[in-house]
Amino acid sequence: MTSPGHTGRRPRRTWAHAAALVALTLAAALLVACSGSEGSGDGTITAQLPTVATGHMPIVGVQDDRLVNADAVPAERVRMIAATGARLARVDVFWKDIAPDPPADPTDPEDPRYRFARLDAIVRGLRAAGIEPLLAVFNAPAWASGGTTVTPTMPYNSRPPDPAAYGAFMTALATRYSGRSSAGGERLPAVRLWEVWNEPNLSLYLKPEGGAKAWTAAYAGLVRAAYPAVHDHGAHDATVLVGATGPRGKTGPGGVGARDWVAALAANDVPGDAYSQHIYPASAPRDVTPAVPSWATLPQLMEAADGWKPGVPVYITEAGYTTAPTPYRKVAVSEDDQARYVRDIFGLEVVRDRRLKAVVWFNLQDNPNWPAGLLRVDGSEKPSYAVFREVAAGG
């Protein structure tokens, strides 16, 4: 059994950015060296958590990281998502792809410089299939972040954008997917679930100048801009997910630890409707381990979130286990263990808590950098695919 203190990191959305692979490899090596979850010195697993067969079942979701690729056909990828039985799909919204040039009116989704066609097709396709879209909005264009990116060859711009520019973009998005707008003569569906950024506590996705306080303050500024934009212009029942916290245990040069990140939401008086967390532990779901974040320590993070907003709903917007080692993660499990872990996750008492609203498996299909898919690279089904379908049928 691998040490629960090691969680490895992954730039997992690199399938569409092959030209940046070398740069990503170097960056990921730094992230792996800097990251890690808190745990006991020897990584001992002390007990096994029980599983339950009854109680509240969260919404079962999946993320297809190939959905945003320029060469992927949205209708085909949506069909593959629907075949899993998932009721929710998390979708990356790359700001720099939709607004490569500054719009004349960034709050107006009809501005001709916006490129919404692909996202329109994705949202329409998911809604037609009865799947709830959850849009995670990040990756700013250079024009919104002082005219530069941290590393121009990287697929993600981790330089913090101007909060006002982010708020304007969120206004355009929320307006377009409010359920009251049309495109091509047809009404666009409403989007209810919005996530502010992706893993902003990790330097791969957000890296301001200064230490942890500057880091959390930069994120707080983005949330303060996005929250009213969504609620003033979006669907009447919109929910803004805050945190989007990457699986890091300790605060250091490469990022802010999960517990410190949650505490900063309260310290910065950040608005929000729900808290979202990513969990990629080295340990099995039922292992009792002090590693943070893990399934065993999720109750601690929920308690910490109470310090921000008592009883705030919780979404696990990424979770998974890789079935092969990669340059970005040394931990790997067998395909049979991955299937067993899917079942175990949804049987955990903390996952069956009514406060936990959804668990999103990442990802639908393996890519060479992140082989945690329910499908292999060639599209064939792993054992976890059938288990996921069975679990999704109950959630």
Image (cartoon, grey):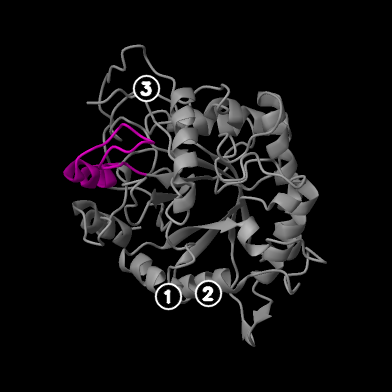
Quarter that holds the N terminus = top left
Q: Which residue is mark 3?
A: 5
The reply to whether discs 3 and 1 touch (Cβ–Cβ < 8 Å) is no
Magenta stretch: dominant secondary structure: loop
Say which residue appears at 62% left-offset and 28% top-offset.
263
Relative image position of residue 304 (x, y in whole percent): 56, 29
Report the Cα–Cα distance between label 2 and label 3: 41 Å
Name above or below for residue 254 compared with residue 218. Answer: above
The reply to whether discs 1 and 2 touch (Cβ–Cβ < 8 Å) is yes
Q: Residue furthest top?
A: 41
Of the residues shown, which amino acid type is indicated by label 3?
A: Gly
Q: Which is nearer the eye, 27 or 343?
A: 27
Of the residues shown, which amino acid type is indicated by label 2?
A: Ala
Relative image position of residue 293 (x, y in whole percent): 44, 30
Q: Mark 1: which secondary structure? A: helix
Report the Cα–Cα distance between label 1 and label 2: 8 Å
Relative image position of residue 113 (x, y in whole percent): 73, 70
Relative image position of residue 84 (x, y in whole percent): 31, 63
- For residue 170, the mark is none
Magenta-colored span: 320-344
